[in-house]
Structure formats: structure tokens, C-alpha cells
Amino acid sequence: MSRLISRGALIVFEGCDRSGKSTQCKKLVEALNNDGIKAKLWRFPDRDTAIGVMISRYLEQKCELEDHAIHLLFTANRWEAVPRMMELLSSGTTLVVDRYAYSGVAFSSAKQGLDMSWCKQPEVGLPKPDAVLFLQLTPEAASERADYGKERYEQPEFQDRVADNYKLMTDDTWKMIDASQTIDELHTVVRAVALEVIEKAKGQDIGQLWT
Ligand code: Z5A
Ligand code: MG
């Protein structure tokens, strides 16, 4: 007799630089696994694929790429992951994703000459997150955190434009979270939100982004 498996949830973390996304994603996956909930950490860009290697070199300022071209590489880096993501979600694993299409659109459209609707097009149809946890932190607070300023895009004026672009993409799946709290305080909030989202996603189909 076949048994229906509840699907996993697609939980995305977004937020400006150094808001604590990677820290919280890791802690959330550990906590869920400790609670016996199947969960896996995912991140974009995935710097381990052939496309990801090109992206990484670009971010580390080791090469130049035309703005439209790098945007499409970031998007391709998501599409190449979709078959595996869908497999995991369908088999009941929750994916905790560190940055997604929203980063793609917010960063690319902060450049001159790339408009938001053009940037969104290649992302249309990606698996739709059940929730976007947006970590809010002022640029001043972010700049006080370790390692700020080493990679491309890590300049205050650019980050301001990115923050404005994020605001234009909010919808009812977004949960705005104050990221100025301590790591542990933030984790408590994040974990509670994630548990609700995982429960709710069980009875729903996986949607398609921006369709
Ligand atoms: N990008 C793009 O253009 N297009 C795309 O499609 C995608 C991305 C997906 C690389 O991303 C760049 O790619 C990014 C966007 C662009 N460019 N920028 N700028 P990345 O994800 O690889 O970036 P990152 O190096 O991981 O940095 P981050 O994501 O900005 O940082 P974070 O993950 O939000 O923060 P963290 O690593 O968890 O924490 C940063 C530091 O703060 C660290 O020392 C922590 O210990 C500390 N920390 C964390 N939380 C706290 C709290 N609560 N209090 C105090 N200190 C804390
Ligand atoms: Mg990070």
C-alpha cells in the first residue's frame, strides 16, 4: 500500500549584506534536524557548479562580465538546481535557502540600464517559496560586522539601491524580521516562523514564482 508523503517547505532567507542570513540558515537546519524534521541547507549562488565557478570569480572581482550576462548566469545557477530541489521537496525534505531569485533581481536591477521587469523574466516559473524570511538591518549596523567590503557590490550606495529594490518585491509570503537582535534571539524567532510554514506547506502544492 502506498503512503502519501507530506512535502517539505521551501523557506528562503533574504536581506541585505551581513544581515545574518547564512548564520541563521545553518542554525535553522541544525535545529530542525535535531527535532527530527528532514531539512537541508541550500544556497545561491551555488559556487560549486561550473556556472557557480564563473559567478564566484566575478564576485571576487577576478573577471568582468557584461551586466545582462552575469544576471543570466545567476538565474541559470538556480534553474540547474531545480530538478534536485523538486525531488527533495516532494520527498518531504524542507529546503532552507540562503538567497534566491529576489537577490538576483534586487542586485542586478540596482545597476544602471537593467530594469526590474527585465531582470524578473528569466526567474519566472522557479519553485515559489512558501515563505521569504527577510532579515532587516541598517547598512550602518551591517558595516560593523566582520568581513564587510571585500566583494563586488559591498558598497553603501549600491546596498541602499538593493534595499529599495527588495521593498518593491514584497508580497504576502514575506516575513520581515528584525536582524539587530543577538544570533540566539533571532534564531528563536526564525525557528518559530519556520515551524509554522512547514506545517502549512504540507497540504499545498508547490507554486511557481511570479506566474
Ligand atoms: N547575488 C546576486 O547578485 N545575484 C544573485 O542571484 C544572488 C546573489 C543569489 C554573494 O552572496 C553576492 O552575490 C551578494 C549578492 C549577490 N553580494 N553582495 N553584496 P553571498 O550570499 O555569498 O554573500 P555572503 O558572503 O554570504 O554575505 P552575506 O550573505 O551578505 O552575509 P550574511 O549571510 O547575511 O551574514 P552572515 O555571514 O551570517 O554574518 C555576517 C557576519 O555577522 C559574521 O561575522 C557573523 O558572525 C556576524 N553575525 C551574524 N548574525 C549576527 C547577529 N545577529 N549579531 C551580530 N553579528 C552577527
Ligand atoms: Mg551569506
Image: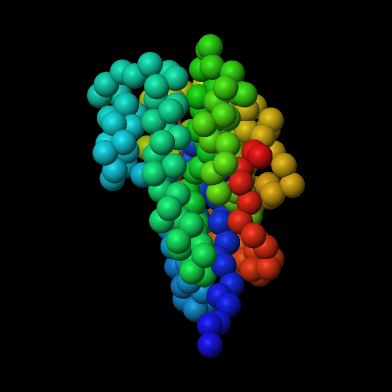
- Report the residue at 74% width, 47% height from top: 172
Residue 59 image position (x, y, % from top left): 34, 29
Nearer to me, 121 or 102: 121
Residue at the spot 68% in from the left edge and 47% down from the top edge: 174
Is residue 120 in view?
Answer: yes
Viewed as shown, does residue 195 lie left or right of 38?
right
Closer to us: 132 or 162: 132
Relative to 141, say whether 95 is above or below: below
Looking at the image, can residue 196 be seen? no
Residue 194 lies left or right of residue 78; in this view the side is right
Which residue appears farthest toward the front when viewing the image?
A: 1
Up-down: is 208 above or below 33? above
Toward which corner of the image does residue 6 lie, by quadrant?
bottom right
Residue 13 in the image, given as x and y percentages of width and height: 55, 48
Total numbered circles: 0
Q: Position of residue 89 (x, y in %)?
A: 51, 62
Instruction: Assign the C terminus to one quadrant of the image.
Output: top right
Q: Residue pushed farthest top?
A: 113
The extreme bottom residue here reads 1
Give how far across and how far down residue 170 sits, in percent.
Answer: 69, 39
| Residue visible at 67% across and 34% down in the picture | 169
Q: Is residue 126 above or below residue 39?
A: above
Give the image quarter of residue 117.
Answer: top right
For the rendered model, the colour scheme is rainbow
